[in-house]
Image (cartoon, rainbow, N blue to C red):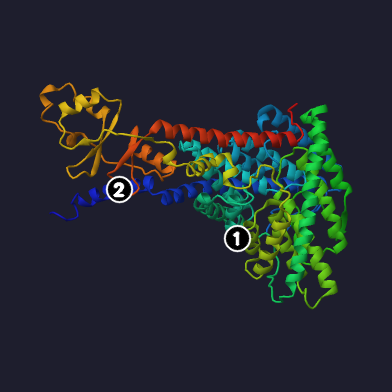
Amino acid sequence: MPGGPLSPMPFHRLINYWKDFVKSYRTVTSFRWLIIGVVVGTLSGLVAAGFFWLVESGKFLIQHHLAGIVSPDPAGEGLFEGPAGQFRPWVIPVFTTGTALLTGWLVKTFIPETINGGTDGTDATINAFHNSGGIIKGRVAIIKGLCSVLTIASGGSAGREGPITQMGAGIGSWLAKLMNMSAKERRMLLLAGAAGGLGAIFRAPLGGALTAVEVIYREDFESEAILPSVMSSVVSYSIFTFFYGTDPIFGIPRFTFHDPRELIFYALLAFVCAAVGWLYVKTFYTIKYHVFFPLKEKIGLVWSMGLGGLAMGLLGILYPYTAQNGLVTGGILSGGYGWLELAILGQIPALGMCYIIIGKTLATSVTIGSGMSGGMFAPALFVGGMSGGLVGKLGHHFFPNIVTQPGAYILVGMAAFFAGVANAPIGPLIMVTELTQGYGLLAPLMLASALCIVLGRGYSLYEHQVENKFDSPAHAEDATINILEQMHVSDFYNPGDVIVLEEGTTLKALTDIIAHSDQFYFPVRSQDGTYVGMVSIHNVRSWMFEEELHELVVVRDLMSRPVYVRPDYDLYQALLRFVNTDYGQIPVVSETDTSDILGLINRDDVFLAYAEAIAEVKGEGQGEAALSAELQPPAKAS
C-alpha cells in the first residue's frame, strides 16, 4: 500500500537527505570546519592525556623515587603518591645530562632541519605557520615530544605547554596532508591542533584557543582559524578531563577586585613584570647565542647540548632546597606550578620569590637555550607569577587596607607577564579567568596586560613572531591583493577603436571580420546599442568551416555573458573578472555608460602585474629574513 510501512519512499528520502548532507559538508565552510575541528580536537586530546601521564610518571620515578626530591604539586595534578626514595641529588644531573646527549643525537641524526627552527615547541609552530607552509613532519613532533618528556621528568626547567602545542599542531598538519588540503587550510588545522593541545594541557579551552591564534603575530591574530581552534580546544579539553577530572590546576580561593585604589598597585605590577620580562628574554637570548652557539661550533651540537644538561642538573641541585616536614624539595626543577600555588596561598616570603625568579630565569635559559626540548610557557608564567607576587606582598605589607589579597597579584602577574613577553593580550587573560573560575579579577587583568604589552614592545619571547599578516609569507597573496588594489585599470588597458559586433551579424560576416582583425574577443551589442555579450574566436573556430551554417548562425547564438571593467576599477577587480570568466580580453567601458566601450584590457597584462606584485612581496620578505639572519649569530649543525 502506498505510503505504508513497506513503502520505499522513506528510504529514498533518506538517501536524498544524505546527499544533501554531504553536499552541505563540502560547500558550507563553517559546518565543514566544525567537523574537522572535532576530529583534530579528539586526536589532540588523546595525545595530551598520554603526554601528561608520561611526564608525571617520569617526574615521580626520577625526581621522587630515584633522587628523593619532593616538589609540591598543585591541587589539580600529582597523579602518583608514595614515600620519597633515599636522597640522591646526583641523580638529577646524571639524568639531565643523559637526556641532553640523547636529544642532541636524535636531533642531529633524524631531524637536523629543526636545529634552528624555534625557541621551543610554540616558536617552532609559529615558524611552521609562517615559513613552512603549515607543515610539521610527524617524526619532528614525535621526537620533540618524547625528548620533552625526558627533559621535564629529569628536572629540566621547561613546561609541558610548548611541546604539546607542537604535537597538536603536528596532528593538524598531518590531517591536512591526509585530506589533501591547501596550504591555507593546512595552516588553519595547524593552529586548531595547537589550540587543542594547549587548551587540554592547561585545562583552559577558551584561553588555549585564543592564545593559539594570537601568539603567531605581535599585532594581529588569525581570525579565520578561530572556529576550528575553539572547537578543537573544547573537544580536546573534554577528552583530557575524562581522564583527569575537571578541577583546575590550582586549588585556590576565588579572588575579587573591589577597591579601585588597587589599580595603582596593579599598574605598578605591570611595570615590574615588564622589567622582569625584559631581563627574562635578554638572559635567554644571551645564553643561547653567546654561550651555546659558540660552543656548538667548537665542540658540536651533541656535546654542547650535553654541557647544557649538566649545567641545568647542577643548578637544580645546588639552587635552593628547603626542608618541609622533613622532605627535601627542589625550587627550580621542571615546570613549578606547585610553587606557584604555594605562593598564591601565601606560603612563600618575598625574599624567597626574588631568589626563585633569578634561579628560574637562569635554569630556563640554560635548558632551552642549549637546545633541550621543552616549553617556555610554564616558566614564563612561573616568573611572571612570582614577580606579581612581590608587588602583592609589599603592597599588603605597607597598605594592608588596600591590598587585601596578595595572592591575586600572582595570578595577574602570570597573565600580564606572558602577555608582555609573547605579545598575546587576550589568551593569557582568559586563561587566568578560567583558572580562577570567575571574572573577579577581570579589570586588573586587562589593565596590567595592556600596560605590559605597551612596555614590552621592544622584545619578544618567540623569535619567529611577525608584526601582522602582511609581514607573514603565509599571507603573501593577501599582501599582493593589497598591492593590486592600489593599481588601476586606466594605467594598463589599451584605449582605441574596438570592433563591436551586432547581434544579428551572420557567421559568414563574422568569419570575414576575424580574418582581417587582430582582435580575439569581440563585444556584442543589441539593436538599441546596449552591450549584451562577448564572442571569443575560440568559440567560433569550430563553426567557421561549416559553410552550410554561415547564413543560419548569427552572433547571438555564439555569444557568452557580458563582462566589463571601468578605468577607475583596481586591478584586483579586473583579476577576479578574468579568473571567473577565463576571457583573454575584457572591454573597458565608460564610467557613466556601460555601452560606451573605450578599449580592451588584456589578461596577460593583469596576470603579469599580479606576478610582479607577488615577486615584490616575497623579495621584501626574503630581504628582511636575510637582514634578520645577519643580525643573529650563525647557526651550524655539527
Which residue type carries mark 1? Thr
Say how many tags the image has: 2
Residue 310 shown left or right of residue 151 in the figure: right
Q: Residue 560: name its quadrant.
A: top left
Residue at image x 16%, y 55%? 3
Q: Left of 373 or right of it: where is 494?
A: left
Judge from the rendering whether residue 506 lies leftward or rightward of residue 490; answer left or right.
left
| Residue indicated by mark 1 | 246
Q: Residue drawn 75% across and 51% down?
A: 379
Marks 1 and 2: in contact by CB < 8 Å? Answer: no
Q: Position of residue 388 (x, y in %)?
A: 77, 62
Residue 150 in which image quadrant = top right
Q: Position of residue 17 (x, y in %)?
A: 29, 50
x then y, percent, for residue 106: 70, 31
Tell me the number on the disc at residue 593.
2
Which one is nearer the viewer's eye here, 313 or 292?
Answer: 292
